[in-house]
Amino acid sequence: MLISLMRGLAALQVVAAHLRAEMFPGLRDIASPPIYYQALAFTTGFAHQAVVVFFLISGWLVGGSLLNKLDRASASTCATADDASPWLAYAIDRLTRLWTVLVPALCLMLLVGVVTEAIDPARADVSTVNEYSTTAFIGNLVGLQTVVVENFGGNYALWSLANETWYYIQFPLLLIMFTSRNRVCQAGAAALLLVLGASLPWSITLYCALWLLGAAFSRIRIDCGGGARVVLIALAATCSIYFRLRGSNNDLNVESFVQDLMYSLPLLAVLASMQAPLAMRSSRMRIVARIAHTLSEFSFTLYVTHIPIIKLLRYIGLQTFGRDRLSPHAPLDYAVYAGMLVVVLAAAWLSYLLFESHTFRVRRAVKNALQPRPRRASMASSSMK
C-alpha cells in the first residue's frame, strides 16, 4: 500500500505542478504574490522529487521482479511458461507495460495537435527536429526522446520515460555481466554497457544508480520499530523540503544527484522495513488503501497524458473565454485551476479504462504467441517410458 500511495501521490504532484506552471505565471515573475499563491507554488513544487520517487519505485518493482523471475527459474526443476525464459518474459513485460499506455498517449497528442492547429494533418514530416514528425513518434516509443529526437507533441513529461527505457535495458545487462557463466556473454554485456554509457546523456546513466538502489533495497529487510520509521520519514521530508527551497530543482543532473540521493536512502530504508502487509483493521485505513490503489493504477496514464490534456484545455479557454492563463490575484481562478485538475484526472482515468487496464490481457496474448509452450503430450510419453 505504501508503494502504491507513493507512486500515486508522485504522479498527482507532477500533474499539479505542470498545471500550475502552464496556467499561472512563475512565482518570481510576480512582484507581490498573494499568500495563497505562495502556498500553491510551494505545495506543487516537488515535481523533481516526485520523478526521483518514480525511479526508486521502478527499480524496486521492475528490478525486484526480474530478480524474482531469475531466482524461480534457477530453483525450479519443472519450468512453467513464464519461468522457461525469464529474459523473454521480462522483455515482454516491459514492452507491453510501456506501449499499451504510450501508443494511445502519442495518438492523443497527435489528435490534440490537429485540434489546436499545431500541425497540418495533410503534411507528413520525418525530420528529427519536428516534435510531431514520424521520426519523433517512433523515437519516443523506443526511449530516444531527449537523446536523438524531440519529446513528441511537445509533451515534456516524456523525458523521464527515456530514462526508464534505458534502465530497463541496462539492468539486465549488468546482471548478465556479473552473473553469467558464459564469458562471451559477460564480455558482450560489458561492451554494450560501455557503448550505452558513452552514447546516452550523462544524466541518464548517473541516475541509473538511484534506480539500481531501488532494485537493491527490494532484496533487503530492515527490522526497526515505529519510532525509527518516523525518524527516517522525517529525515527524508526535511531533506526534500530543504532541497526544494535551496537546491537544484530543474533538470536531473550532476548538481542535483547528491541531494536526491540524500532523501532517497531514508525513503528506501522505510520501504525495506515495511515489507509485511499492513493490517487493514480500521475503516480509515481501508479508505486510504483504496485511494492509494486507485491513484497507483492509473498513475502511468496520468503521467503521459496530462500535458496534451492541459494543452487542449488551454486552447478551449482561449477560444471560449479569450484567455489561456489564470491570474494569481483572482480567487475565482484557483477554483478554475482545481476544476481543470479534476478534468485532467477524469480524462486520464478514462484513458486508463480504455487502454492501460488491459495491459495484462495484451501481455498474456504476446507471451502465448512468443513463448514456447510445454509439450504436455511429449512429457506424458516420456514419463510412461
Image: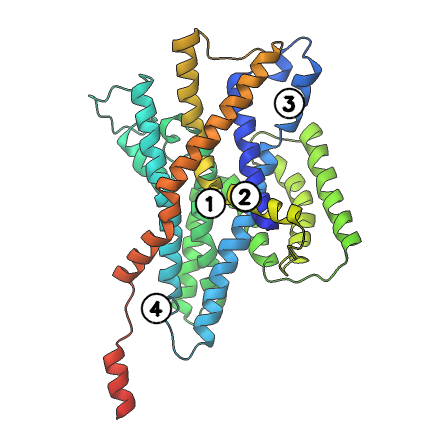
Which residue type carries mark 3? Leu
User: Which residue appears farthest toward the front when viewing the image?
Assistant: 283
Name the residue that disc number 3 marks. Answer: 40
Which residue type carries mark 1? Glu
Which mark is nearer the camera, 2 or 4? 4
Q: Residues within 10 Å of mark 3 (few under 14, many from 20)?
A: some
Which residue type carries mark 2? Phe
Q: Position of residue 135 (x, y in %)?
A: 29, 33
How far apart are the two marked residues, 1 and 3, measured between alpha carbons? 29 Å
Decide if residue 309 is on the left or right side of residue 262. Answer: left
Q: Are marks 2 and 4 in contact (CB under 8 Å)?
A: no
Earlier-in-chain disc, 1 versus 3: 3
Earlier-in-chain disc, 4 versus 1: 4
Name the residue that disc number 2 marks. Answer: 54
Which mark is nearer the camera, 4 or 1? 4
Name the residue that disc number 4 marks. Answer: 81
How far apart are the two marked residues, 4 and 1, measured between alpha carbons? 26 Å
Name the residue that disc number 1 marks. Answer: 164
Residue at image coords 56%, 27%? 17
Q: Are marks 4 and 1 in contact (CB under 8 Å)?
A: no
Residue at image coords 45%, 58%? 172
Q: Secondary structure at mark 2?
A: helix
